[in-house]
Image (cartoon, helix red, strand yellow):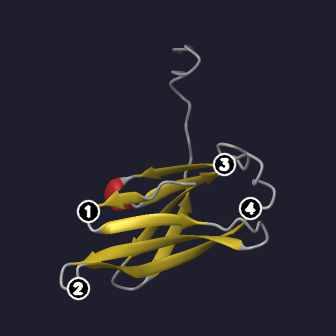
Amino acid sequence: MVQPRFWKKMAYFYLSSHDDSIVAKLVAYQWNDLTLEFEKKCSEDIGAESSLQALYHKFSFVSVGDDGVILSQANTGTFKVYKCDPSTGNMSNAAVTISHASGAETGDQG
């Protein structure tokens, strides 16, 4: 179970099935003040998680505010930022580069 991420009127959900052959999705909804309901705005196929089913901590899913969400699948070593444009219904994604130049985690303050 991956907890949804909310920012202002947007809500991002990672949806997957107990059937590991079904493709998982990242779906974004926007709150509608007139209908008082969330409306589906964007959807992105993430891929089948058949090799990840047995892992306990499978995903990192972090809100980055106006920039969308960052999603990382376990053992893939890749992080992507996803952002829904509710006016067009398009979900953009881009790789996130993690720099460890400061050496903060290892104490190597070079």
Instruction: Report whether 60 appears left or right of 10.
Output: right
User: Relative to residue 33, is residue 52 depicted above or below?
Assistant: above
Measured from the top left, where is residue 10 in percent x and y? Answer: 33, 68
Q: Earlier in the sequence, mark 1 or mark 3?
A: 1
Q: Earlier in the sequence, mark 2 or mark 1?
A: 1
**What's under tag 2, amino acid-wise?**
Thr
Mark toward the viewer: 3 or 2: 2
**What's under tag 3, amino acid-wise?**
Lys
Cα separation between marks 2 and 1: 17 Å
**What's under tag 1, amino acid-wise?**
Lys
Cα separation between marks 1 and 4: 29 Å
Mark toward the viewer: 2 or 4: 2
Q: Quadrant of residue 20?
A: bottom right
User: Relative to residue 77, is residue 21 depicted above or below?
Assistant: below
Q: Residue tagged by mark 3?
A: 58
Q: Earlier in the sequence, mark 1 or mark 4?
A: 1
Measured from the top left, where is residue 89 in percent x and y? Answer: 43, 84
Q: Earlier in the sequence, mark 3 or mark 2?
A: 2
Q: Are marks 2 and 4 in contact (CB under 8 Å)?
A: no
Q: Quadrant of residue 71?
A: bottom right
Instruction: Report whether 100 appears left or right of 64.
Output: right
Q: Are marks 3 and 4 in contact (CB under 8 Å)?
A: yes
Q: Residue tagged by mark 2?
A: 35
Determine crowd level at label 3: few under 14, some 14-19, many 20+ residues with C-alpha closer than 10 A: some
Q: Residue tagged by mark 4?
A: 49
Q: Label 2's element?
A: loop
**What's under tag 4, amino acid-wise?**
Glu
Cα separation between marks 3 and 4: 9 Å
